[in-house]
Image (cartoon, rainbow, N blue to C red):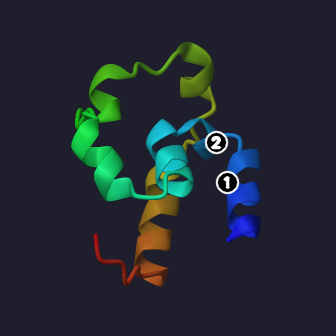
Amino acid sequence: MLNLYILIRNHPIIKDDGLLSVFLTEPSFETWRKHNSVSLEEESASKRVDRVEEISIPSDLEDKLAYVSSHFSCNCVV
């Protein structure tokens, strides 16, 4: 578990995810959740892509996503 924590804390994107941090550090996530409100707003509804980010999107993104979705499956229960 410590290795996973170190991996997440060093990841350039998910290290800033406050809820994930709480989930990994709080002894009782359920108790924490009962005493704190969590925004359920979709991040994409409020985040705007700036010009630099837009330029960095691969032109064949749709093809790459189609390939990944056709070759990999997630057996996740959320």
Left or right placement of residue 75 versus residue 23 in this view: left
Q: Is residue 55 above or below residue 71?
A: above
Say which mark, if any, is on residue 15: 2
CB within 8 Å, label 2 to label 1: yes
Q: CA distance from mark 2 to mark 1?
A: 6 Å
Identify the amino acid type marked 1.
Ile
Q: Measured from the top left, where is residue 71 in percent x and y?
A: 48, 82
Residue 63 left/right relative to 75: right
Residue at image location 67% in from the left, 71% down from the top: 1
Q: Residue 8's x, y, as percent?
A: 67, 54
The residue at the point 55 percent across, 42 percent down is 59
- Residue closest to the eye, 64 or 18: 18
In this view of the protein, which residue sits in the foreground, 33 or 5?
Answer: 33
User: Dot 2, crowdedness within 10 Å: few (<14), some or many (≥20)?
Assistant: some
- Of 1 and 62, nearer the camera is 1
| Residue identified by numbered label 1 | 8
In the rendered image, residue 51, in percent from the top left (x then y), is placed at 56, 15
Q: What is the three-letter code of the residue carrying label 2? A: Lys
Say what secondary structure mark 2 lies in.
Answer: helix
Of 33 and 3, which appears nearest the observer?
33
Say if 60 sits above or below 72 in the image.
above
Which image quarter: residue 78? Answer: bottom left
In x, y percent, where is residue 22?
Answer: 49, 46
